[in-house]
């Protein structure tokens, strides 16, 4: 299966290029997630072996960090800021709008696989709250309408 | 001759459309056969004007803002390339009141230079501190930092010189400099602005730190939420290596310093220095017991300086102009300048760098222009999610570490988040408990269990259930968190919770019950 081969290759590349760094585990996990969008369970034994760790240790690290995920994300990931500055500018309303527009809650992916929704605690864009990030793009002063526009544009480009 | 136009690449300006504006300017210029040199600078920090475009004219840089891509054609029509009149014309940038009233030491170049141009950095006094440091011995470098009175800008305000001295005096075959770039506090973005707007100043500061304490390896632990900063830092580091400012035998001095960016993975607690080191070592970010201090046994068990971005970025000017120069700014034991960040419900959000001593009221009204909504400002949270909520009666407190601790508040990283009178302070207290529960590293029970219990108790209070029992219970829980937690995540969650309860009891079901404890 090419998919499986692709995954294996990403994991092997990550291990080969990074395993000699001091404290290599986080860089390796980042590299795998950058390539695949998540860290597949099948990759854990290989990473553990390369770093001389137990599988439980690697799993423990993955699950400790909010950013790492063990399931594939949707095509686009929406990160909505939930922190105080954004709250002061109405992010709670925006959050409910986003949830109802996408029809999902945090940590979920739409049934058609197009969008995942994740909370984030500050994007450093607080001076233009409320803010969010979709994939690599950042947005300040997000209104319900602006959100709809952005999402509709992404939908049509899919 | 080509005209230089500045369009910020700062991510907050980008979040308001700066990339599209830059593209539109380039396209218009092409269509009109005009030669324009677009420099993607950092932000001057006047975010309500972003994207703020500047044009270099004979009289100085003329600002236009906030510019949207749909404004660009009109700007060309109005001859903005020669500073022409237009409704978005703000005049000379340096004459803008908000900007003019600041004292920019650490941020001297941010928004002015091309962040990733080493030439530009050097042209604007960059690397003068390092050159001085290379002519000194370690003890003298550390002495300058001690004399400057610089205290850590990451939150705890510990004197940087003392920390460096401990590392200097701890013998070891390997020492490390870690830059804490985990900036997780809501309402703070000055670290991000430095890294995106003047990354060389951080690289230089870390190199000086390495010389000062005898460390040859540095790590910048950067939060994953800052991909733009990662890009600029890596570009700056590559340029510094290329030109011999990093690596083996720096500028032929015989000294070496290596630097690498490491990316976090979305855990707030990894901003705590021992948790950060665990994370850098490739482990879960569990907080370590202290002692031993990181300065004695830190990363991989070696003596390690852990400093915040702003602390390290303040070092080059100290080594350039001397410790005394820096110390002469400020008040009391709070010396030098503090980059203050205004955000939340405020008309003019942005970055203000000034000597310690300004009051909150000056910042909120003179700089900030009052609330964005036009409603009364009811509360401000200073110092991030673990900072106290301050009511109007405390707005005359000067920015000074001791003045803040005297009223059970914290200055932290200098972030000020503003709320108008529509805020519900019981909801904010609940959020603080929930945040603690989400972000707890789990090592100690008061924090791990207490925050979950605290969230439940806040739910009951918000419901109006049995207030005479639940409010004392909340205070009791806070007391346990305050006294029983290993680190400040659990230990300071009571600051926002209790300050909300004490200053805004009417949001917790009325005055009487709230004070029944
Ligand atoms: C939960 C928690 C989070 C922290 N987050 C940060 C942070 O994001 N950046 C930072 O510089 N310091 C942070 N600190 C403070 C660091 O532990 C440490 O004091 C600081 O990095 C030392 O650098 P400084 O002396 O230059 O301030 C945090 C502390 C705690 C308890
Ligand atoms: S207070 Fe919380 S975050 Fe800090 S060490 Fe204890 S459990 Fe971990
Ligand atoms: S609080 Fe939302 S970006 Fe900082």
Image (cartoon, coloured by chain):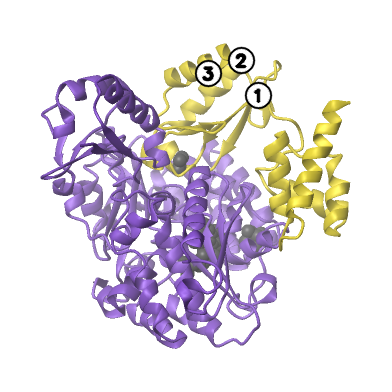
Chain colours: A yellow, B purple
Q: Relative to residue B30, is residue B428 drawn left or right?
A: right
The answer to whether one can see residue B154 in this image is: no
Mark closer to the chain start, 3 or 1 = 1
Q: Quadrant of ligand 2?
A: bottom right
- Disc number placed over residue A75 in the picture, else none: 1
Q: Are marks 3 and 1 on the same chain?
A: yes
Q: Chain of mark 2?
A: A
Mark closer to the chain start, 2 or 1 = 1
Residue, x 31% and y 37% (percent of image)?
Answer: B38
In this picture, is B343 found above or below B517? above
Residue wearing tag 3 = A151
Which marked residue is nearer to the observer: mark 3 or mark 1? 1
| 2 and 1 marks in contact (CB < 8 Å) | yes
Callout 3: 10 Å neighbours few (<14), some, many (20+)? some
Q: x, y percentage for residue B31?
A: 28, 19
In the picture, residue B167 is in which quadrant? bottom right
Label 2 element class = loop
- Disc number placed over residue A158 in the picture, else none: 2
Give me the C-alpha separation between circle 2 and circle 1.
9 Å
Q: Are marks 2 and 1 on the same chain?
A: yes
Callout 1: 10 Å neighbours few (<14), some, many (20+)? some
| 3 and 2 marks in contact (CB < 8 Å) | no
């Amino acid at each position: 299966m090419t998919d499986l081969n692709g995954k294996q290759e990403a994991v092997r590349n990550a291990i080969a290029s990074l395993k000699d760094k001091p404290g290599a585990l986080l860089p390796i996990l980042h590299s795998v997630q950058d390539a695949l969008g998540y860290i597949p369970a099948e990759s854990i034994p290989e990473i553990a072996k390369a770093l001389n760790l137990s599988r439980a240790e690697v799993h423990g690290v993955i699950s400790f960090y909010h950013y790492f995920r063990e399931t594939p994300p949707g095509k686009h990931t929406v990160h909505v800021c939930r922190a105080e500055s954004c709250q002061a500018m109405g992010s709670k309303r925006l959050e409910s709008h986003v949830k109802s527009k996408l029809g999902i809650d945090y940590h979920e992916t739409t049934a058609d696989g197009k969008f995942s929704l994740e909370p984030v605690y500050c994007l450093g864009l607080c001076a233009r709250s409320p803010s969010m990030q979709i994939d690599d793009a950042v947005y300040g002063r997000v209104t319900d309408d602006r959100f709809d526009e952005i999402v509709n544009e992404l939908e049509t480009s899919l | 001759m080509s005209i230089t136009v500045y369009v910020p690449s700062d991510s907050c300006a980008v979040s308001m459309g700066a990339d599209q504006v830059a593209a539109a300017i380039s396209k218009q210029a092409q269509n009109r056969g005009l030669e324009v040199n677009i420099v993607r600078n950092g932000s001057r920090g006047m975010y309500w004007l972003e994207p703020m475009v500047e044009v270099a004219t004979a009289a100085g840089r003329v600002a236009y803002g906030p510019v949207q891509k749909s404004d660009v054609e009109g700007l060309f029509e109005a001859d903005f390339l020669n500073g022409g009149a237009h409704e978005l014309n703000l005049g000379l940038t340096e004459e803008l009141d908000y900007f003019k009233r600041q004292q920019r030491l650490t941020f001297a170049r941010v928004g002015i230079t091309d962040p990733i141009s080493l030439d530009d950095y050097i042209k604007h006094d960059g690397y003068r501190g390092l050159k001085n440091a290379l002519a000194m011995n370690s003890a003298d470098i550390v002495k300058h930092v001690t004399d400057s009175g610089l205290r850590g800008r990451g939150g705890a305000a510990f004197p940087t010189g003392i920390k460096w001295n401990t590392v200097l005096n701890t013998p070891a075959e390997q020492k490390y400099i870690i830059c804490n770039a985990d900036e997780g506090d809501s309402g703070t973005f000055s670290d991000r602005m430095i890294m995106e707007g003047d990354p060389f100043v951080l690289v230089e500061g870390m190199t000086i730190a390495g010389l000062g304490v005898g460390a040859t390896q540095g790590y910048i632990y950067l939060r994953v939420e800052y991909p733009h900063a990662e890009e600029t830092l890596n570009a700056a580091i590559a340029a510094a290596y290329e030109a011999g400012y990093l690596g083996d035998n720096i500028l032929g001095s015989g000294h070496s310093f290596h630097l690498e960016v490491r990316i976090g993975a979305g855990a707030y607690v990894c901003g705590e220095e021992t948790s950060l080191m665990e994370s850098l070592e490739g482990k879960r970010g569990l907080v370590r017991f202290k002692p031993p201090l990181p300065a004695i046994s830190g990363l991989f068990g070696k003596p390690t300086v852990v400093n915040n971005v702003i602390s390290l970025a303040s070092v080059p000017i100290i080594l350039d102009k001397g410790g005394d120069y820096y110390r002469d700014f400020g008040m009391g034991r709070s010396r030098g300048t503090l980059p203050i960040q205004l955000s939340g419900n405020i008309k003019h959000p942005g970055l203000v760098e000034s000597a310690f001593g300004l009051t909150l009221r000056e910042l909120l009204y003179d700089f900030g222009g009052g609330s964005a909504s036009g409603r009364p400002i009811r509360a401000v949270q200073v110092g991030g999610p673990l900072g106290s909520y301050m009511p109007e009666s405390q707005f005359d407190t000067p920015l000074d570490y001791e003045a803040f601790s005297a009223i059970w508040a914290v200055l932290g990283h200098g972030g000020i988040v503003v709320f108008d009178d529509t805020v519900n302070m019981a909801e904010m207290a609940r959020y603080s408990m929930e945040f603690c529960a989400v972000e707890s590293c789990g090592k100690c029970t008061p924090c791990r269990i207490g925050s979950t219990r605290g969230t439940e108790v806040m739910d009951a209070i918000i419901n109006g259930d049995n207030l005479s029992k639940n409010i004392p219970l909340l205070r009791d829980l806070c007391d346990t968190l305050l006294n029983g937690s290993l680190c400040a995540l659990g230990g300071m969650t009571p600051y926002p919770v209790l300050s909300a309860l004490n200053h805004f009891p009417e949001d917790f079901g009325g005055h009487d019950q709230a004070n029944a404890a």
